Amino acid sequence: MTEAPEPGSKALHALAQLADSRRPQIDASRMAAVLAHPDDETLGLGAQLRRMPGLRLVLVTDGAPRNLADARAHGFEDAAAYAAARRGELQAALREGGAEGLAVTYLDAPDQGAADDLAALARRLAAELAGIEVVFTHAYEGGHPDHDATAFAAHAAARLLAADGAAPEIVEAPFYRLGDDGEMLAQDFAPEPGSAPVQLVLNPEEAARKTRMMGAHATQRATLARFEARAERFRMAPDYDFTRAPNGGRVLYERFPWGMTADRFAELVARARRDLGFDADGDDAG
């Protein structure tokens, strides 16, 4: 742990508990992990899941792009069959990780389409997160449009809940982004002002468990081969302006035929902010 928890910060207290290798479990009954795809739970905090009884896992997409290219590449005729397979892989991964008892909620947005209606997604998340104190989610890093959409929706849901005096604190994990040299960086935070990252170095048993979890996501094997099971990183989420391109404007998903650019994402965020009433107070962030 790089810093002591601040008084009253439930998120930093949770991170301090996770960083204590002598603590086998922490009470996660008021915590949730809001993630974009089946397999993000493994990449983001797979080694910690068995230590977090009571955690609610919310998956925003079904993991099945509607263009069917991925589905057919893995031998499935339609998106529904591919999504079902990915649900099965998630359950297998949770079993490998000793976390098969976690409650899982699927919002079933189309893979690569989570940003299409951000206001509706934020409202659904707010309903799911009622009573939650700490949310683990994606960093805003320009790696995958669904990751950025999930980050926005988690922050927006927290803001909606703040109106009732019950906003959860947000902890984020890095997944992947473009580096300065134009190559992909895995599990490395983009520089942002705010709290220093917490790095949990995995011991051999934890690393082996996480490796088995990654292997359980069989359809994602080629993608997950880029990631190492050595450490998991977290930090308190900064107060993002989601209408600005993340990662210094280096946006990886613009390289892929996913129908998303930084400019279009900013437009979708601006539309969602208007729909949610966030612009009425003149606040540009969020």
Image: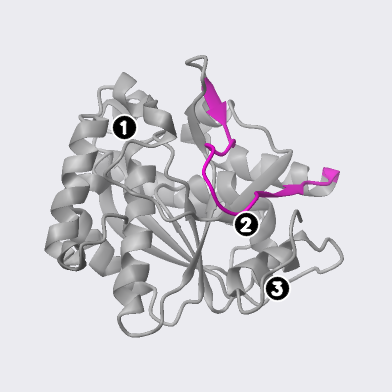
Residue 224 at least partly seen: yes
Q: Dividing the picture into quarters, in which one does residue 160 lie?
A: bottom left
Residues rendered magenta in the picture? 184-204
Q: Is residue 241 magenta?
A: no
Q: Position of residue 166 (x, y in %)?
A: 41, 82
Amino acid type of the residue tagged 2 in the rendering: Arg
Residue 167 x %, y %: 41, 76
User: Which residue occupies the extreme top position in the image?
Assistant: 181
Residue drawn where x is 31% and y is 32% of the image: 71
Which label's residue is closer to the chain start, 2 or 1? 1
Of the residues under marks 2 and 3, which one precedes in the sequence? 3
Q: Residues within 10 Å of mark 3 (few under 14, many from 20)?
A: some
Please name the amino acid that badge 3 sits on: Ile
Task: Report the label total.
Answer: 3
Q: Quadrant of the N terminus?
A: bottom right
| Local secondary structure at mark 1 | helix
77 or 41, nearer to the observer: 41
Q: Position of residue 187 (x, y in %)?
A: 59, 37
Q: Residue furthest bottom?
A: 164
What residue is rendered at 38% in x and 80% in y? Answer: 130
Mark 1, residue position: 71
Task: Decide if residue 66 is in sight here.
Answer: no
Per the image, the residue denoted by label 2 is 95
Viewer-closest of 27 and 178: 178
Q: Nearer the viewer, mark 3 or mark 1?
A: 3
User: Where is the C terminus found, in terms of image quarters?
Assistant: bottom left
Q: Is residue 187 magenta?
A: yes
Q: Quadrant of residue 105?
A: bottom left
Q: CA distance from mark 2 to mark 1?
A: 24 Å
Q: Which residue is mark 3?
A: 26
SS type, badge 2: helix
